[in-house]
Image (cartoon, rainbow, N blue to C red):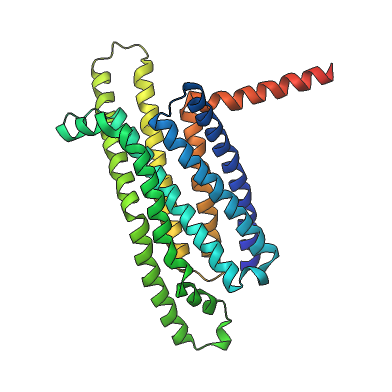
Amino acid sequence: MSDLFSAICLIIAIIESMMGLLGNATILAVSSTSCIRSKLSSSYDMIMIFLSLSRLFLQSWMMLDFFLSLFCEASYYEENLYVTFKTVFVFLNYSSLWFAAWLSVFYCIKVASFTQSFFVWLKQRFSSFVPWMLITSSLFSFVISLPFSWDIYDVHNNLTTPLTMRNSSERRGTMKTSLLILILLCNAGIALPLIMFVVSSILLIKSLWRHTRQMQNNATGFRDPSQEAHIGAIKSVFSFLILYITNFIALVLILSDAFLPFSIGEAICIVVMAACPAGHSMVLIWSNPKFREMPARILQHINCHVRTRSM
C-alpha cells in the first residue's frame, strides 16, 4: 500500500514539475526578451532570469530523479549515482531558495515605503548590488552543498538495508546521527535566505497593509483600482511566504532522512517540493501582466491556427 501511494505521489510530482517547467520557461523567455530589447539588464529581470533558470534545472533534475527512482531503482541507489543526484539536487534547491529570497528583498526595497536612512540608502544602491548578490549566493550554494557528496550519504545507504538484517537500536542511532548532522548542514545552507525571505515579506505586507488602510480612510465610496492592486499584492506576497516556508520544511525533512525510502512521509514531501516552486511561478505569472501576455499570445495564435485549419 505504501509503495503504491509513493508511486502515485511521484507521478503527481512529475506532473507538477512539468507545470513548473512551463511556468519558468515563460518567465525566463519574457525576462530575457526584456533584457535584449532594452540592452540593459534591470535588477528585476536579472533576478527573474536567475530564479527561473535555477528552477528549470531543478524541476528537470527532479523529474529525472523521479523516473530513475521509479523505473531504475537498483541503479538509482548505487553509491556514485545516488550521491551525484542528491548533491546536485541540494545545490539547485539552495540556489532557488536564495534567488527567491533576493526577489522578496527586491520587492520589499522597491515597493515598501519606509523612511529610515538605511532603507533609503539601500533603495538607492540596491541595483548595483544585485549581480554580486546573485553570483555570491550561487557560489555559497555550491560550497555548502559539497558536504553532501562526502561520506554523509553512506548513512542513507545503510538505511536502505532491510530492518531484519540490521540491529534496530543501531539503526535508530544511525538515523539520529544522520538527522542531526544533516539538519545542521541544512540550517547552514538555507537559514539565512529563509530569514531574509520572511523578514522582507513581513515588512512588505506591513507597508502595503498600512498604505491600504490609509487609502480606505480617504476613499470616496467608489471602487479604487489602486487599493485593489495593493490588496492583490498583499495576497501574492502572503502566498509566496506560505509556499516558501512549506518548501523549506519539506526540503529539511528530505535532506535529513527523516523518512524511510518510499514511505508515505517521503512521498508527501516530494509532492510538496514539486508543487511549491511550480505554485510560486504560477503566482508570479498571474500577478505580473508582462508574464501573462506571452501565454495569452500563444493561446491566441493556437486558436487562430485551429480556426484556419478548420475552415
- Looking at the picture, does residue 235 appear above or below residue 273? above
- Which residue is at the front of the view, 305 or 43? 43
| Residue shown at the point (53%, 87%) measured from the top left | 166
Give the percent coordinates (x, y) of residue 178.
42, 74
Give the percent coordinates (x, y) of residue 219.
28, 14
Q: Residue furthest left?
A: 117
Q: If the image is split into quadrants, where does the N terminus sit?
A: bottom right
| Residue shown at the point (38%, 23%) measured from the top left | 229
Q: If the image is split into quadrants, where does the C terminus sit?
A: top right
Q: Is residue 1 visible?
A: no
| Residue shown at the point (55%, 83%) measured from the top left | 163
- Which residue is at the front of the view, 242 or 102? 102
- Looking at the picture, does residue 32 appear above or below residue 311? below
Give the percent coordinates (x, y) of residue 210.
24, 28
- Looking at the picture, does residue 83 appear above or below residue 102? below
| Residue shown at the point (32%, 12%) measured from the top left | 221
Q: Is residue 128 left or right of residue 116?
A: right
Q: Is residue 126 left or right of residue 257?
A: left
- Looking at the picture, does residue 83 appear above or below residue 292? below
